[in-house]
Image: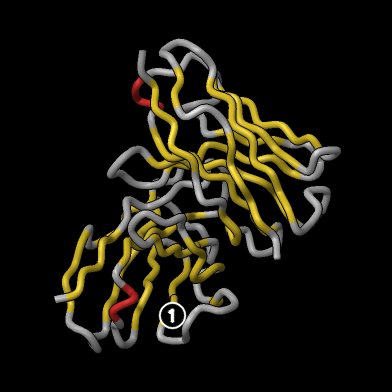
Amino acid sequence: QLLLQESGPGLVKPSEPLSLTCSVSGGSISSSNYYWGWIRQPPGKGLDWIGSIYYSGNTYYNPSLKSRVTISVDTSKNQFSLKLNSVTAADTAIYYCARGGVSEVALDIWGLGTMVTVSS
Amino acid sequence: DIQVTQSPSSLSASLGDRVTITCRASQSISRYLNWYQQKPGKAPRLLIYAASTLQSGVPPRFSGSGSGTDFTLTISSLQPEDLATYYCQQSYNNPRTFGGGTKVEIK
């Protein structure tokens, strides 16, 4: 059974970068059948798509974050990562990683999520 | 960006009721519409993809329909475990925008 687990600091200072890692277990991240994505959810609010990365290395980012975000994959560690620069309080959220099916074009497996607070 | 609008934002229904949630896209998205369920304090769970295909393990009381710009999620007989917020998401193009959510409460 494929499992995804987010990890990273729970507290980040304003203007600093936010870095999170999603570890994939029970399956390989190197499959052309899937893509890997990040989604966030501010406290008490809805879901916000951050971006995704495909087996080919192609990345797609939400234009609202594009200048600040980078998603990358480390196949040797079976992980993918999110880096968000110059954070503000508005970036405080639960961050989820998820797997998407290329055929289904839907996020079928999600991590539990990790809460990140931006505060000095 | 394609905007996705859900309605209602919340609803209250009795056990056994038929519940319908709608999602409207700002442009045609064919059948590239997914539905997720998020229970309090939990990660979202995929219910339906491609507008009407039930994800493995999802109870058959959930169903989806629609194409183009208008879509519907139906719960045929509301159960206690269906207390949750439901989100639609368009996967026609990037960014893969989500609807604002519909919170379902039990009367």
**Chain letter of the residue carrying label 1:** B
Quickly name the residue at label 1: B63
Q: Position of residue A18 (x, y in %)?
A: 53, 22
Q: Nearer the viewer, residue A39 or B81?
A: B81
- Indicate whether B77 appears above or below B54: below
Question: Farthest residue toward the right?
Answer: A76
Residue farthest toward the left in the current orientation of the protein: B107
Amino acid, disc 1: Ser
The residue sitting at 56% across, 68% down in the picture is B50
A36, above or below B81, in the image: above
Image location of residue B97, percent across then percent down: 46, 46
- In the rendered view, does A22 fall on the left or right side of B59? right
Question: In the visual, does A44 lie left or right of A111?
Answer: left
Q: Is residue A11 above or below residue B26?
A: above
Given residues B20 and A74, the one toward you in this image is A74
Taking depth in this image into account, of A10 and B6 the one nearest to the observer is A10
Residue A9 % position (x, y)? 52, 27
**Seen in the image, is B24 located left or right of residue A82?**
left
